[in-house]
Every structure is written in structure tokens, then in C-alpha cells.
Image (spheres, grey):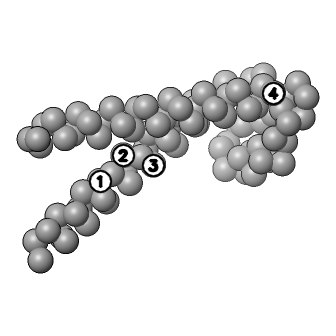
Amino acid sequence: MNERELKGKIKTTAITIGLFWAVCLFIITLISYKIGYGKEFLKSIVSIYPGFSITIKGAFIGLIWGFLDGFIGTYLFVWVWKFIDKMVNIA
């Protein structure tokens, strides 16, 4: 696999995980808003994502923050993994 293909796979993985986390957060927020499920978990997320709350509006804000967090976190994780893999294979 060449470098260009690998970068494409990293972006695809980051987008996929970003979307997955965003949709999960959105759904859990709506469920919590309606019946209270997951409220304690979401209270910890409120302290991390500015503007996020357990409301309909907050679910959409969480959707955006969730995607950004999942995308950036995954991209950085894979970048560090590649760096460490190169270092280990040099030795």
C-alpha cells in the first residue's frame, strides 16, 4: 500500500468513527431528554463540549462536537500509531 492510499484510509477511518460517535451522542441525548437514560454519562460530556446540553438543541450541538472529536481523535491516534510503527520497524 502506497502513502497516498494509506492517507485515504486514515481519513476514511477518522470520518467513520467521527460519524459513529456523533450519531451515538445524538441518539443518547435525545433518549436522555425524553426518558432520562444516560443522564449521568451526558453530564460529563456537558463539561467537555461547549454549548452541549441535554436538550433537542444540545443534541445537534453534540452531533457537531461528536464528529469533530471522533474525527480529530482518530486521525491523531492513527498518526501516532504510524509514527511509532515506523520507529519500531527501524530498529
Classed neighbour count for the residue bearing mark 1: other residues with Cα under 10 Å, few (<14), some (14–19), many (≥20):
some
Q: Quarter of the image containing the C terminus?
A: bottom left
First of labels 4, 3 by sequence position:
4
Count residues near mark 4 (Cα–Cα under 10 Å), then give few for <14, some for 14-19, many for 20+.
some
Decide if residue 20 is on the left or right side of residue 52.
left
Q: Mark 2 and mark 3 in contact? Answer it, CB < 8 Å.
A: yes
Residue 36, by quadrant, is top right
Residue sitting farthest toward the bottom: 91
- Specify the quadrant of the image occupied by residue 72: top left
Q: CA distance from mark 4 to mark 2?
A: 29 Å
Report the amino acid beneath label 4: Ile
The answer to whether any part of residue 61 appears in the image is no
Q: Which residue is mark 1?
A: 79
Residue 34 versus residue 66 in the image, above or below:
above
Residue at 24% from the left image edge and 57% from the top image edge: 82
Disc 2 is placed on an element classified as helix
Mark 3 sits on what residue? 73
Between discs 1 and 4, the one toward the N terminus: 4
Left or right placement of residue 18 versus residue 91 in this view: right
- Closer to the chain start, of discs 4 and 2, is 4
Residue type, numbered disc 3: Gly
Q: Looking at the image, how many numbered discs can be counted on the residues?
A: 4
Numbered tag placed on residue 31 in the rendering: 4
Whether residue 67 sits left or right of residue 50 in the image: it is left
Task: Tell me how far mark 2 sits from mark 3, CA to CA.
Answer: 6 Å
User: In terms of secondary structure, where does tag 3 sit?
Assistant: helix
Q: Which mark is residue 15?
A: none
Q: Position of residue 86 (x, y in %)?
A: 17, 64
Are dots 4 and 2 in contact, CB under 8 Å? no
Q: Residue at x 14, y 68 (%)?
A: 89
Mark seen at residue 75? 2
